[in-house]
Image (cartoon, grey):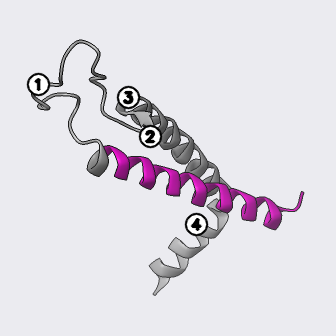
Amino acid sequence: MRKAEFNFWLDCILFLTGTGLALSGFVRWFILPGNGGGYGFRGGQWFNPLPTFIFPRAIWSDIHKFLAVVFVGLVVVHIVLHWEWLVAMFRSLRQK
């Protein structure tokens, strides 16, 4: 696989991971706020106390944490692959 093709797929995966991070963060922040507390009386013995939107809040937290670790790892790979370009840019900016 050529370097340009690898960079393309890496960037696509970074975009999808970042989108997943944004989505899971949005769900945790706006749709399922709180940490399960502050909901008052929940209605009897058979009532489901877990606030859910497709998944329970705990699963959304796990998804968010997993995507964050994958995203940071991919960013590190991206920086390593572009290290020579970064050094050249810093040198050219320092010379101006």
Query: Please, what is the dominant secondary structure of the magenta stretch?
Result: helix
The one nearer the camera, 59 or 41, is 41
User: Residue at the location (66% across, 64% down)?
Assistant: 84
User: Residue at the location (48% across, 82% down)?
Assistant: 95
Whether 61 is among the magenta residues is no
65 vs 76: above or below? above
Task: Give the CA separation, mark 1 to mark 3.
Answer: 20 Å
Q: Secondary structure at mark 4?
A: helix
The one nearer the camera, 37 or 72, is 37
For disc 3, the marked residue is: 58
Disc tally is 4
Task: Give the CA separation, mark 4 to mark 1.
Answer: 59 Å
Task: Give the CA separation, mark 1 to mark 2.
Answer: 29 Å
For disc 4, the marked residue is: 87
For disc 2, the marked residue is: 64
Residue that extends furthest to the bottom in the rendered view of this protein: 96
Q: Amino acid at mark 2?
A: His
Mark toward the start of the polypeptide (1 vs 2): 1
Region in magenta: 1-28
